[in-house]
Image: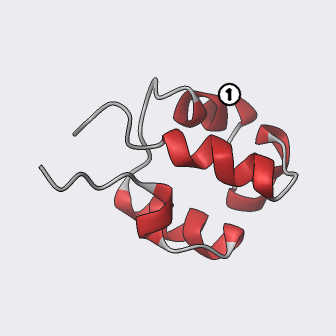
Amino acid sequence: MDNGNLNRLKVILAEKNLTNKALAQMVGVSPATVSKWVTNSTQPHLDMLIKLSKCLDVSIESLIRISED
């Protein structure tokens, strides 16, 4: 998996005026976990991607960058 896949999460949070802490509360994880996703230190599992997409009202595809290589 490309380490840049979750770059979109930071952009979406900014667009929705949400903080890492707010998102963490919405999906039931620690703010540190969200920070790791935003900085690409770690990636959420598929079940969490689904939860993130529902909470942020965006598609899973918009959370990940799918390259056409």
- The x, y position of residue 31, in whole percent, is 74, 35
- The x, y position of residue 67, in whole percent, is 24, 51
Please tell me which residue is depicted at 37% across the width and 51% down the height of the picture: 65
Q: Would you place residue 17 above or below residue 47 in this image?
A: above
- The x, y position of residue 26, in whole percent, is 77, 60
Circle 1: is it few (<14), some (14-19), or many (20+) Cα within 10 Å? few
Left/right of residue 7 with respect to residue 66 in the rendered view: right
Please tell me which residue is depicted at 59% across the width and 48% down the height of the picture: 9
Report the residue that reaches farthest toward the left: 69
Left/right of residue 18 with respect to residue 9 in the rendered view: right
Displayed quadrant of residue 54: bottom right
- The x, y position of residue 56, in whole percent, is 69, 67
**Numbered disc 1: secondary structure:** helix
Amino acid type, mark 1 = Ala
Q: Quadrant of the N terminus?
A: top left
Please tell me which residue is depicted at 55% across the width and 26% down the height of the picture: 39
Left/right of residue 24 with respect to residue 2 in the rendered view: right
Residue designated by label 1: 32
How many numbered tags mark residues here?
A: 1
Report the residue that reaches farthest toward the front: 69
Q: Would you place residue 1 above or below residue 61 in this image?
A: above
Left/right of residue 29 with respect to residue 65 in the rendered view: right
